[in-house]
Image (spheres, grey):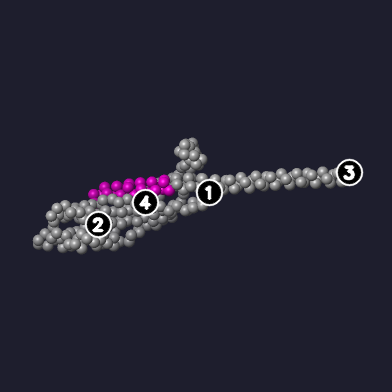
Amino acid sequence: MKDKRKKNRFNVINLSKFRIKRKLFAFFLVLFILVFVYAKFVATPVVLSNTRAQISSFATKSINTAVADVMKQNINYADIVSVEKDENNNVTLIEANSIKINSLSRVINSEVLNKFLLLASEPLKIPLGTFSGIPILSGTGPEIAYKVKPYGEVFCNFLSSFESAGINQTYHKIFMVVSIKINIIMPFNKIETISSSNILLCESLIVGKIPDVYLNSNALTKLLNLVPETFSSWQN
């Protein structure tokens, strides 16, 4: 009789432990699902949006500061383009200095890349309140720091533009387009962004009739971009 009671007692205890374990398992399973859903649909979009905004800001700042530093060299129109005229002062040839353009492109590329990687090496920060998903709490609370490893490419292109300034007078402008294509692998997603800046490199007033081959086509732009379009790729 006593053995039977002991056996029943053990059965009750084992059943009770099983129920507790089952409840704990269910609790942690629900908790895991809630954390997963929160991370995927609330936290991750916040991190992605913040990362994209800060990295784009770094890229734009890198381009602007790098170009500003290079432009301190006082680049002249004659350094980039040479213009030949006939005895009637009409333009017969507009030629791009490919050696100078190539050198300039590489210098700007190197400066942009160095400045971007320096900025991107610093941890990004998000205020804790932003993770709540509540607009009124966005930007509040202590900041959470995290690091990313961007990889991508730097591009440098040139554009030629002619604008009439009167009879047989034309403004010729050379623009430089610097772009950074950035990719970042994040949990649940991948960030891809391109930041570009269009900078006036130099300009000159050309007196004399310019052939239509330059005015009405992108022939000179093609000459300016004979050098490779992509000068650098990196993986941080």
Q: Is residue 12 left or right of residue 138?
A: right
Distance (Cα) linking label 1 and label 3: 56 Å
Other residues around mark 4 within 10 Å, as few (<14) / some (14–19) / many (≥20): some
Q: Which quarter of the image is occupied by the N terminus?
A: top right
Q: Is residue 121 left or right of residue 86?
A: right
Distance (Cα) linking label 2 and label 3: 102 Å
Residue 234 forms part of the magenta stretch = no
Instruction: Tell me which corner region of the image, top left, top right, bottom left or bottom right, holds residue 6.
Output: top right
- Residue under label 2: 160
Identify which amino acid the numbered label 4 is placed on: Ser
The x, y position of residue 19, in whole percent, is 72, 45
Residue for point 63% across, 47% down: 29
Range of magenta residues? 52-75
Sequence order check, earlier mark of 2 and 1: 1
- Residue under label 3: 2
- Residue under label 1: 40
- Visible in this render: residue 217? yes
Identify which amino acid the numbered label 2 is placed on: Ser
